[in-house]
Image: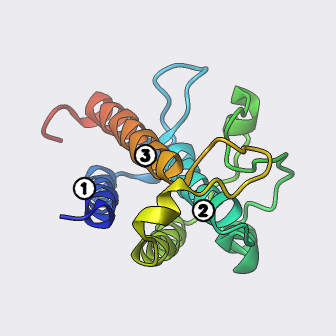
Amino acid sequence: MSFKNIIQFSCAEYASELERIVAGLTDEERRFTPHPDSHHIDFIVWHIARVEDTWINSFAKQAIQIWDEQKWATKLNLNIHMEEPRSGWGWKIDQVNSMPKFEFRKLIDYLETVRNCTDSYIDNLNEEDMKICPDKNRPDYSIAEMLGHIVVEQSQHIGQISYIRGMLRGIDG
């Protein structure tokens, strides 16, 4: 199995797990927070999609993000002021709490669009590309490190969502 297959397999596995753990959750359940200073599932799923879009498009490809190119802020009713990196990273809890409600299915559509872009990007990589550091602001951060980060970060967020679901519905809920 090549490095491409391993990374794509990892991304597909956490996408499948995400689909499983959000299945059947109500809007209210997805907005539940276990603590007043915690994130809710809608925010975490949005953040997962935004992080991947940012890393693949802005960092790796040095291109416009799908978020901007396809006007996903408008599609999701999230035309809110966001400082860079516009992925929710570093948000304060009041920003998370003020996130407008949106149609969750559209968010999943955005995530799937990002994932297809990621798969296509990975398909076109070769071993030498993994050493490239494409961002002059991060001269020592390679494509390989970025891909490893995506897999780890997204997996952590899947765990957070799974934990919240377990709090709401129990271990088998």
> Which mark is in front, 2 or 3?
3
Identify the amino acid type marked 2. Answer: Asp
Q: Residue at x 45, y 76 (%)?
A: 116
Quadrant in which the N terminus appears: bottom left
Identify the amino acid type marked 1. Answer: Arg
SS type, badge 2: helix
Residue linked to disc 2:
53
Q: Residue 15 in the image: state x and y as whole percent.
A: 33, 59
- Where 101 sits versus 148, above or below? below
SS type, badge 1: helix
Quadrant in which the C terminus appears: top left
Tell me if I can see residue 122 in this picture: yes
Of the numbered discs 1 and 2, the one sitting upstream in the chain is 1
- Marks 3 and 1: CB-CB under 8 Å? no
Residue linked to disc 1:
20
- Where 105 sits versus 18, above or below? below
- Where 156 sits versus 145, above or below? above
SS type, badge 3: helix
Q: How far apart are the alpha carbons under marks 2 and 3?
A: 15 Å
Q: Quadrant of residue 7?
A: bottom left
Q: Residue 54 in the image: state x and y as whole percent.
A: 65, 57
Of the numbered discs 3 and 1, the one sitting upstream in the chain is 1
Residue linked to disc 3:
148
Is residue 58 shown left or right of residue 23?
right
Q: Quadrant of residue 60?
A: bottom right
Tell me if I can see residue 28 in this picture: no
* Residue 130 vs residue 19, the one in the foreground: 130
Is residue 83 shown left or right of residue 8?
right
Is residue 123 shown left or right of residue 136?
left
